[in-house]
Amino acid sequence: MAKKAELLVEAKALNLEVTDKNTIAEIEAAIAGTPAPVVETAPVEDETAQEEAEVKTAKSGKRSEKAIAETEAKIAKEERKEAGDTTPQSEEAVKLAKGPRPVTRPVIERRGKAYQKVAKLVEKDTVYSLADALELATKTSPSKFDASVEVHVKLGVDPRQADQNIRATVSLPNGTGKTIRVAVFAPETDHAAAKKAGADIIGDETFLAQLDKENIDFDVLIATPAYMPRLGKYARLLGPRGLMPNPKSGSVAIDVAKATLEAKAGKVEYRVDKQAIVHLSIGKVSFGAAKLAENAKAFFDSLQSQKPSSLKSAYVKSTSISTTQGPGIKVENVTN
């Protein structure tokens, strides 16, 4: 340190620009008038290259090359937006910013193999007659079980209007193919007749006790008019399930035995939904085209009789038939 101090004094005497930060070698070189020795240092890489080297990429996730490129493209887009740059970008840059376009397969390809096989039998643009549609429906069921055959009718009514809210019942000549469980809520004097007619559940106080436990093991509930007020507290339980007795559906009746026989024989209720469509099962595939045609005719006759007198537009807009899991079959209008 003493030597460095002496050299600094000598350098200042010679008016040399040196400080205590300079090394002894640098001060001596300045006094001697020779250039300072060059100290070899490791080459400094470009800062950008160094930063890129420090970034480690992964096969997937936020550190993948693809994610990093998308992030950079997004940042560049925000910068252009702030700068007000509306210059069109290259297609490659746009694709990179938006990411790959999702590949959406056609609906038919997303179906099972059994469905795809039977769907080939139905021509999409063809409107079939009722007889041909029912014959085709028996051949286009991809299910292993005995599927139901369903009719779907789009009406030109407004369900919000009271006189156009279609709701009725129809007795299908060949039944629905389902085992209907009927419950009867009536006075004890009607129990014997209801049991003889085939009712599965009969009762008054015992039946209400089952409803208190929300034990519902029936498909149709029949009640007498006098007993209807006692079912009021269960409206929230029965209503959403379509089990609340209603005079229009014939489930509120004085003669409970007759109502039970009709329900067991295949009397079903249909009603228009919020989309103005009526859905009804008219039997099983095992019925065959002939029996299904008889049930379909009974339904369409009943539906035609419910046509509102105030309706000015077309009553039936479109009709289709399908099995439970099968493709839809367009049907020509069979009502007037």
Image: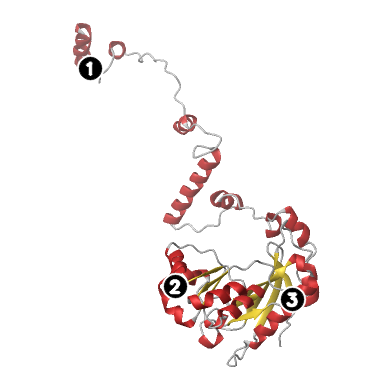
The residue identified by callout 1 is: 20
Judge depth for marks 2 and 1 and give the one in front.
Answer: 2
State the residue position of label 2: 235
Q: Is residue 48 left or right of residue 92?
A: left
Q: Which residue is mark 3?
A: 331
Q: Quadrant of residue 321?
A: bottom right
Q: Is residue 148 visible to us here?
A: yes
Question: x%, y% of residue 81?
Answer: 45, 56
Left or right of 67? Residue 282 is right
| Secondary element at tag 1 | loop
| Amino acid marked by disc 1 | Asp
**Is tag 2's residue or tag 3's residue first in the polypeptide sequence?**
2
Say which of marks 1 and 3 sits in front: 3
Image quadrant of residue 117?
A: bottom right
As drawn, which residue projects farthest toward the bottom? 309
Q: Residue at x 51, y 86 (%)?
A: 162
| One can see residue 123 in this view | no
Between discs 1 and 3, the one toward the N terminus:
1
Residue appearing at x 74%, y 76% in the figure: 331
CA gap, disc 2 to disc 3?
38 Å
Q: Name which residue type carries label 2.
A: Ala
Q: How far apart in space, not on screen, are marks 1 and 3 (Cα)?
A: 103 Å
For residue 146, which numbered disc appears in the image?
Answer: none
Inspect the image, locate mark 3, and give the three-letter code of the amino acid beneath it: Val
